[in-house]
C-alpha cells in the first residue's frame, strides 16, 4: 500500500468537554463519522496522524490530564504530534514526517471546524498538499458575532466549506473518502 495519503485527526481530545462553549449537539454524529474514517484508514494501511493541542488554557494544559483522545473514539495513531498554534504544521514536525513517508494527500478531520481544522487545511494547501476536507468528520460549537448574531455549527460548517472549496481543499463526505480508500485496496 502506497503511503501517499494520510488521515489527520486534529484536536479530538477531552479538553473540549471542559470548555464553557462545549455542547453535546452534533457530538454523536461527529464521533460516528470520525470513527468511520479512522477504522477504514487503519484497515487500508493509511497512516492516522493524531494531533493534540496544548496551551496555557487550563483544559488544554499539559498537566490537565485532558490531553487524550475524546471519549468515544478508538484510535491507534501511526504518529502523534503536539501543537501550540492553530495549524498542525506550526512547530510540530508534521511536515517533515509527511515528507519522510512520501505523503502528499491529506484527509482533514477533527475539532474545531473553522479553527484548527480549517487553518490546517489552508496551510497544507499552501505547502502543496492535496487536501480532502471532511466536514462531517469535524465538530464545532455555536459562536456569537460582535453584532450579537449567533451562528450555529451548521452555519459555521457551511461558511468553512464555502471558503475552502476549490481553493484550498476538495470538500468530501465520509462516504466519498471511504469509497476512495476502499478503491486503494
Image (cartoon, rainbow, N blue to C red):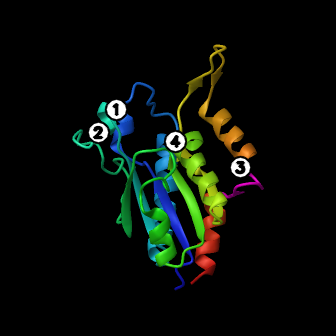
Q: Mark 4 or 1, which is nearer the eye?
A: 1
Q: Is residue 77 visible?
A: no
- Do callouts 4 and 2 mark residues in contact (Cβ within 8 Å)? no
Q: Main secondary structure of the magenta part?
A: loop
Taking the magenta stretch, the answer to whether it contains residue 32 is no
Q: Which residue is mark 3?
A: 164
Residue 57: mark: 1
Residue depicted at x 64% and y 73%: 180
User: Relative to 185, is 88 above or below?
Assistant: above
The alpha-carbon separation of the residues under discs 4 and 2 comes to 18 Å
- The quadrant holding residue 178 is bottom right
Residue in the picture at 70% in, 55% down: 168
Where is residue 157? Give x, y as percent: 65, 40
Above or below, 116 relative to 92 = above
Q: Of tags 4 and 2, which is closer to the observer?
A: 2
The label number, if any, that marks residue 112 in the structure image: 4
Residue farthest along the front direction in this orientation: 91
**Circle 1 SS class:** loop
Position of residue 153 relative to residue 86, above or below, is above
Q: Secondary structure at mark 2?
A: loop
CB within 8 Å, label 2 to label 1: yes
Amino acid at each position: 500500500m502506497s503511503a501517499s495519503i494520510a488521515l489527520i485527526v486534529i484536536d479530538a481530545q477531552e479538553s473540549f468537554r471542559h470548555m464553557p462553549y462545549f455542547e453535546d449537539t452534533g457530538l454523536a454524529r461527529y464521533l460516528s463519522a470520525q470513527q468511520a474514517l479512522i477504522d477504514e484508514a487503519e484497515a487500508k494501511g493509511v497512516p492516522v496522524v493524531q494531533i493534540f493541542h496544548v496551551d496555557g488554557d487550563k483544559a488544554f494544559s499539559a498537566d490537565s490530564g485532558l490531553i487524550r483522545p475524546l471519549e468515544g473514539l478508538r484510535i491507534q495513531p501511526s504518529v502523534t504530534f503536539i501543537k501550540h498554534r492553530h495549524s498542525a504544521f506550526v512547530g510540530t514536525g508534521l511536515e517533515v514526517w509527511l515528507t519522510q513517508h512520501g505523503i502528499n494527500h491529506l484527509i482533514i478531520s477533527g475539532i474545531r471546524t473553522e479553527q484548527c481544522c480549517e487553518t490546517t487545511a489552508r496551510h497544507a494547501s499552501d505547502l502543496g498538499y492535496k487536501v480532502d476536507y471532511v466536514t462531517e468528520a469535524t465538530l464545532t460549537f455555536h459562536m456569537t458575532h460582535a453584532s450579537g448574531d449567533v451562528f450555529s455549527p451548521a452555519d459555521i460548517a457551511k461558511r468553512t466549506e464555502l471558503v475552502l472549496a476549490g481553493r484550498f481543499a476538495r470538500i468530501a463526505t465520509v462516504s466519498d473518502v471511504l469509497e476512495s480508500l476502499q478503491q486503494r485496496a
